[in-house]
Amino acid sequence: MCGCLRVIVCLHMLVTAAALRVCPGVPVSSRVSTKIQQLLNTLKRPKRPPLSEFFLDDSEEIVEVPQPDPNTPKPEGRQIIPVKGEPLGVVSNWPPALQAALARWGATQAKSPALTALDITGKPLYTLTYGKLWSRSLKLAYTLLNKLGTKTEPVLQPGDRVALVYPNSDPGMFWVAFYGCLLAEVIPVPIEVPLSRQDAGSQQIGFLLGSCGVSLALTSEVCLKGLPKTQNGEIIQFKGWPRMKWVVTDTKYLTKPSKDWQPHIPTANTDTAYIEYKASKEGTVMGVAVSKIAMLTHCQALTQACNYCEGETLVNVLDCKKDMGLWHGVLTSVMNRIHTITVPYAVMKACPMSWVQRVHIHKARVALVKCRDLHWAMMAHKEQKDINLASIRMLIVADGANPWSVSSCDAFLNVFQSHGLKPEVICPCATSPEALTVAIRRPGARGAPLPARAILSMGGLSHGVIRVNTEDKNSALTVQDVGHIMPGVSLIYLNMSAPQGSLVFVVGKIEGLLMVSGRRHNADDLVATALAVEPVKTVYRGRIAVFSVTVFYDERIVIVAEQRPDASEEDSFQWMSRVLQAIDSIHQVGLYCLALVPANTLPKTPLGGIHICETKQNFLEGNLHPCNILMCPHTCVTNLPKPRQKQPVDVGPASMLVGNLVAGKRIAQAIGRELGVVEDQDLIRKHQFLSEALQWRAQMDPDHVLYVLLNAKGVAVCTATCAQLHKRAEKITATLMERGGLNTGDNVVLLYPPGIDLIAAFYGCLYAGVIPVTVRPPHPQNLAATLPTVRMIIDVSKAACILTTQPLMRILRSREAAASVNVKTWPTIIDTDDLPRKRPPHIYKPPTAEMLAYLDFSVSTTGMLTGVKMSHAAVSTLCRSIKLQCELYSSRQVAICLDPYCGLGFVLWCLSSVYSGHQSILIPPLELESSLPVWLSTLSQYKIRDTFCSYSVMELCTKGLGTQTEMLKARGLNLSCVRSCVVIAEERPRLALTQSFSKLFKDLGLSPRAVSTAFGSRVNLAICLQGTAGPDPSTVYVDMKSLRHDRVRLVERGAPQSLPLMESGTILPGVRVIIVNPETRGPLGDSHLGEIWVNSPHNASGYYTIYGEESLQADHFNTRLSFGEPQTLWARTSYLGFIKRTELLDASGDRHDALFVVGSLDETLELRGLRYHPIDIETSVSRAHRSIAESAVFTWTNLLVVVAELSGSEQEALDLVPLVTNVVLEEHHLIVGVVVIVDPGVIPINSRGEKQRMHLRDSFLADQLDPIYVAYNM
């Protein structure tokens, strides 16, 4: 120890000495170890802000705090003083311990019956006498202490804890085990029989056993045989349970004690006698340890209160392992030599009248029941005419404190009074595992006040105030007294109780307490209200669960009930809406969710009640499987923040300073590197027009392969050298001139599948001087949905002619096509499959580079079809910019797995290779549907360094190949060659997808730095593209609440409500980007959210519009800033984003400005005065449940509509409704108006993998979605 201390002291001195020696500018002494030096260096680093700054709970600023109601009732009356029960009488022959009582009766009254058990039909099965109970308990005690281990190493010692696992149908075995444990001085822990590994609450029981140190379980042979086993016959390891040794306690396995052995029976003391388990409100299971003295004194108090006499008969319908069933039916009964007849739950289910028959036959004096047993007997009594209950002096109702017990007791009395039942024998009581019996009504006791009722105001109770209700009969709670406080109970604090005289009234249990908006409601009261609602035939009486879930800083009430199989949907909804109204008017509280599940599907407790905690867990995990559901968040969520009031925007002197420029922030702008000047005349010719570039290549390097087209097997089905492409283009030009009857500048639609024909047709049009318009061909299996878009583009572009293939030409003229569009009015259709070998007389050369090269048509995610004009100058500048950014030249190979119809996908597929001379390996994305690995195996096979794909391709690979990486590795697939894999998109980078793609294929050698994204828009097809030179894309975390207010607040990773954003790639050469306030049009500062504006020589020239909407064109394409740099012309992208100057350096050595795209302005949802991006809500929704495959959101009349695709079974459909509502409320502070559950594939997605939310909205409004379920949240 000394040595250890000395080492520590030395170390401390060394560190101090080192700290003294190292000063700024002083060389580090070589004697200081490098580790200590590292430690010191870290100490010198600037500290990060403490965690609390990142993780402050901001509920104060979010939640609307309800103002106190001036009409809240205040407590009145005198202060409650402790109430005392009568003193516990002293009886001379009371035993010193409970075991002593058993020993006495076993010796003196051996023939006296102790217990009668019934078979399943309700007939007596066996009777255990006090003699047999004593001798068997003695044998068990002896066996436990002496026969389980060796003499030197016994398995059990006095004070050890043992689990008792016996079914209720075998009370005799349980009695013997319980008293055997008491005699052996080991502590019994009675638990339920686990029926399966996944039993309701079984895991929590296991936790209790583990924490009590239980490793031995006593059970019967029959029970052991029924337990679930593994294949080799061993009992399975129950979930959460400790390892158990199982001991069978049937008589034949017990050893008779030797003559000299006697059990040790000490006088009752404070040592633990047994442990009873109870479940808390949250579902955790706790053990309540009852001491020997408490057990004995409680039996004495019950004997005095209930006036038990020797030899009486008692019928027990309760669980004999715990609570009242144990206290009266096992302990107090033995103390008083009572004959107990046990009626287990299984018998009650088969024959609900069995307990009443037993009372009649045995002339029982006492019966122990629950309200349910009264109700069942009442329902079944018509079969029994000759029943007499006059013998009963106490009918103890264990749950008599419940609000619905009043009606059960009254109804039972009403039916059975004619059978001799006296009104005063009904005895409700109040108990709890911790306090045991608190109060019980005692009939016929001298001087006892008559039973009483209290009619209390429900509103008062919710505020914690006792008020007698006089006005509104509906909102009154009627409770019956639970009699006097127990003898010997000298002090009781009545928190949830109301003493009246010396009677006790219980108004609820802590377990059932629901705190909503600061008011208390009781689950039992809500059940009672629900049960009173007509039509009662909709649900089962005893099968209603009420609990609360915490959503958005408050508890929300959920009611789940089992629906009868014969109830119609109309009945159910009628019942549900009436329950909502009843609870609202009676309890003045809104229900959050009301769900009906099929009969017998709620998790049960062992005695048939509902396992509330398990039901709640199923609800929150989406495993409840309701058949009807009603959500009412609009009425009960009252703490939402106030809607934001937007201030009117006037461009005045003050708004000139928008963007915190006053604070000295730099303007948020970023510039790509210089494009440079082309010197060589030859190159100028080559670079001015793409058509000339192709001719030049065909002449200079005719056999250089420009394009290779692969099929699903990865086989090259078509290649094109420079010369072949040129000649094929010439043939098309000749045909166009001959058959098209076209003028220069006419528009020609190219309708081709992805391939080299499309490229040849494009250059054929350029050679002919006509304007190509590429259009995605219609899907042959889905003409009704895809052909109208084709027709619309052809009409809008005023195409004079269509170039296509023979199969597509047949489709355009087919009868199926005629069902969707008018096929008689197509423009001239020319198929280019078999063209004659003709050369055109001349190849067209545009007079200026500002002339139109092609039209780019695309359907935006908001459903708008826009065509933009691309000039020859823009095309060649764009190609040059990409060439510089990606370092493309003739010896390079690039793999492209994109749709080639619009945007950057079209540029890379058709234009870039001709300009830069690199070889493009083309993989149509459709081929991945028949062979998923084709893209990745191409990268590996051709050792590709640069590849371009879309999000849909990346998602297909991630979902479809994620589990097959080992197999692909075995086949030799290696991605270590890939230097850059760029996702081409017009949206915010999908960080989760790119990260999971990188992680999944890291094992195949893919560098984590390889994956990046590009960004383009309608006004400029390529703004950002991660090339070879720039720094790696950076990621920042922004606060989502600020984003909704159009602000950017950077936070740390993992901060609550944080959203990770990835940079959209390096800005292309020749491009300038600035962030602008969309309303004032003034530039904004660094890290401020605004619209992204772009200035670049490859901006599109404008929209191609039919009716010449010049105002729109001018607004988007030739816009000036309101101040700062008014002469520069900018194009508005309609995307929100921000620029952040990073610590990284770009190629020129300057600090790198990163552009972060947040989302499209056109797509944002304006709700409650805030701006929401659909993708954020959809990300939350997709996380809500494992069966949500995809989701989309849109607004409809100020309501938020969520459409979720269900990938699981249809029984899970309604589980999604509350989970979707919860997650959107929690994370986005919005109430979902409509939840639509649909089949997979219903949400339309375009070729770039973007959701077409407006198409979806139109289908929803036109009722064309064919949903599985639509929930209108009230």
Image (cartoon, rainbow, N blue to C red):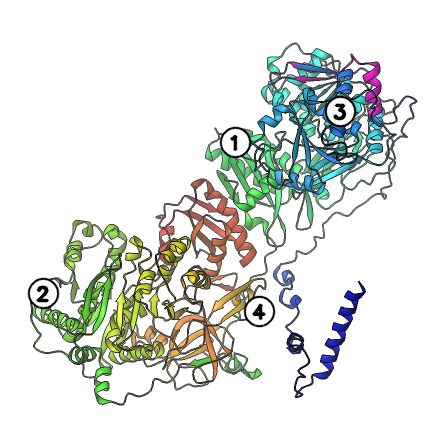
Q: Residue at x 14, y 56 (%)?
A: 824
Which of the two discs, 4 and 3, labels the residue nearer the N terminus? 3
Secondary structure, mark 4, is strand
Give the label on residue 330, or none: 3
Outermost residue on the top side: it is 386
Q: Is residue 673 left or right of residue 142?
A: left
Secondary structure, mark 1, is loop
**Amino acid type of the residue tagged 3 in the rendering:** Val
Please identify the quarter of the rendering in which residue 1050 is found: bottom right
Q: Which residue is mark 2?
A: 835
**Amino acid type of the residue tagged 4 in the rendering:** Val
Q: Which residue is mark 4?
A: 1051
| Residue 994 place in picture, x, y as percent | 43, 63
| Residue 995 place in picture, x, y as percent | 46, 63
Distance between the alpha carbons at the discs numbered 3 and 2: 100 Å
**Amino acid type of the residue tagged 2 in the rendering:** Leu
For the residues bearing labels 4 and 3, Cβ distance under 8 angstroms: no
Quick one: label 3, few (<14), some, or many (20+) residues within 10 Å? many
Which of the two discs, 1 and 3, labels the residue nearer the N terminus? 3
Q: Residue at x 51, y 30 (%)?
A: 564
